[in-house]
């Protein structure tokens, strides 16, 4: 028993000596890892090609955060818009690209730029028709890109275009000229889409009156002209008396072009005045007067010059009484006066129809008392 214990003790002692005299490294069974290598970041922008062209016509308000902002009015007889933003550069953000349906930012192809601009539709003076057509196009270098039906149609009942906003993004060469051109009634107005500035030529100047809007007041609001007459019948007929009673309520606007007279002379605008004329019969008979409009309706400008009406040449009291015509009187004016005076003194031969006799001449029997209306002009702010 003692021998067994002694041997066991000896073995334990040898084991202890072995442990105390040696050191051990921990064993790692995983292979050593390699040092990480840096990776290039991925550009999220889509590179478009040299023919890239997109037009957004959803009508939703557009913004161009990379671009320049302004409110340049582009207006012609049948078109009205403002250039809201414009841009040329290498890249467009996702915020911009998403507005034309793209899912990533955009970048220009090598050797090219991206161009973009936004337009907001306004309130044209006249509604475009099949007889009066507006042509719009984009000029990029030597290329012309038609832009048909900008803003779709204008809706007079709502006072707005069916599509209120449009946005364009396209590829251009760095040296390409970029212009928006709108042709209407033989005049083409142009805007430089790199600078947002107009091409100030004869056409741009001619359309000034469509870019500027005026509120025109009239005092008094209405007036009535009266003048008595007596017929001069043959001896066998009895003379009859009557009175011309002409009531007017002038309503004016300034326009550089009208469907009736076309473009105003250089440096002038047309003062177009709806007279809202009403004729009443006074006395025993109705006087049929052929009114010489040029002599009867004058405009006196701020310098005191009296300007005869340019349209119409004449109008009859019979046509007014039967509401066969709307008396629309037009004068060529400077468009720069703060006020003017309309003078109205109907002149022209007068006749009367008897029961069995026609075209009996008559003479005026009372003096004329001309009407005067003070016209005042105030700039009208354009809607934002």
Image (cartoon, rainbow, N blue to C red):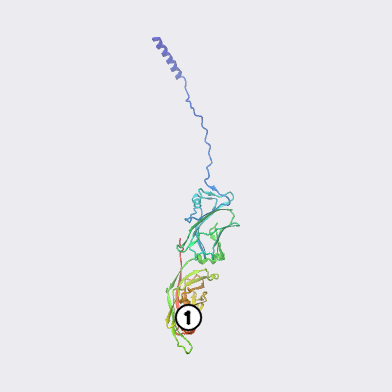
If the image is split into quadrants, where does the N terminus sit?
top left
Query: Residue 347 placed where, x, y %?
Result: 49, 80
Compare residues 49 and 90 and report the one nearer the observer. Answer: 49
Q: Quadrant of residue 265?
A: bottom right
Query: Residue 66 placed where, x, y %?
Result: 51, 52
Q: Secondary structure at mark 1?
A: strand
Q: Is residue 112 above or below residue 15?
A: below
Q: Residue furthest bottom?
A: 235
If the image is split into quadrants, where does the C terminus sit?
bottom left
Residue 210 appears in view:
yes
Compare residues 45 and 360 and report the one nearer the observer. Answer: 360
Query: Residue 83 placed where, x, y %?
Result: 51, 59
Residue at 42% over, 81% down:
282
Q: Quadrant of residue 241?
A: bottom left
Q: Residue furthest left?
A: 1
Write down the residue under mark 1. 288
How many numbered callouts?
1
Compare residues 265 and 319 and report the one nearer the observer. Answer: 319
Residue 87 appears in view:
no
Query: Residue 2 placed where, x, y %?
Result: 39, 10
């Amino acid at each position: 028993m003692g021998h067994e214990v002694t041997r066991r003790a000896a073995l334990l002692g040898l084991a202890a000596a072995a442990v105390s005299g040696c050191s051990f490294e921990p064993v790692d069974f995983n292979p050593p890892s390699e040092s990480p290598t840096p990776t290039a970041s991925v550009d999220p922008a889509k590179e478009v090609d040299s023919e890239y062209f997109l037009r957004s016509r959803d009508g939703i308000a557009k913004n161009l955060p990379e671009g320049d902002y302004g409110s340049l009015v582009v207006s012609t007889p049948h078109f009205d818009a403002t250039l809201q933003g414009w841009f040329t550069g290498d890249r467009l953000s996702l915020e911009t690209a998403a507005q034309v349906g793209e899912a990533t930012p955009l970048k220009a192809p090598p050797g090219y730029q991206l161009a973009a601009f936004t337009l907001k539709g306004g309130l044209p003076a006249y509604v475009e028709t099949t007889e009066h057509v507006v042509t719009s196009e984009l000029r990029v270098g030597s290329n012309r890109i038609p832009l048909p039906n900008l803003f779709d149609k204008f809706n007079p009942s709502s006072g707005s275009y069916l599509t209120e906003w449009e946005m364009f993004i396209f590829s251009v060469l760095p040296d390409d000229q970029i212009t928006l051109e709108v042709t209407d009634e033989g005049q083409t107005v142009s805007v430089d889409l790199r600078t947002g500035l107009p091409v100030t030529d004869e056409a741009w100047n001619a359309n000034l009156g469509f870019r500027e809007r005026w509120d025109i007041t009239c005092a008094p609001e209405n007036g009535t002209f009266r003048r008595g007459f007596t017929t001069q019948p043959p001896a066998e007929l009895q003379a009859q008396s009557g009175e011309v009673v002409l009531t007017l309520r002038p309503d004016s606007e300034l326009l550089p072009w009208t469907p009736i007279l076309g473009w105003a002379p250089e440096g002038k605008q047309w003062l177009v005045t709806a007279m809202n004329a009403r004729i009443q019969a006074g006395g025993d008979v109705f006087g049929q007067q052929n009114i010489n409009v040029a002599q009867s309706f004058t405009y006196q400008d701020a310098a005191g010059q009296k300007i005869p009406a340019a349209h119409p040449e004449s109008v009859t009291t019979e046509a007014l009484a039967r509401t066969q015509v709307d008396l629309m009187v037009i004068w060529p004016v400077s468009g720069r006066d703060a006020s003017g005076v309309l003078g109205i003194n109907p002149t022209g031969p007068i006749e009367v129809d008897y029961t069995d006799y026609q075209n009996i001449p008559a003479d005026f029997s009372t003096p004329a008392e001309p009407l005067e209306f003070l016209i005042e002009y105030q700039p009208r702010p354009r809607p934002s």
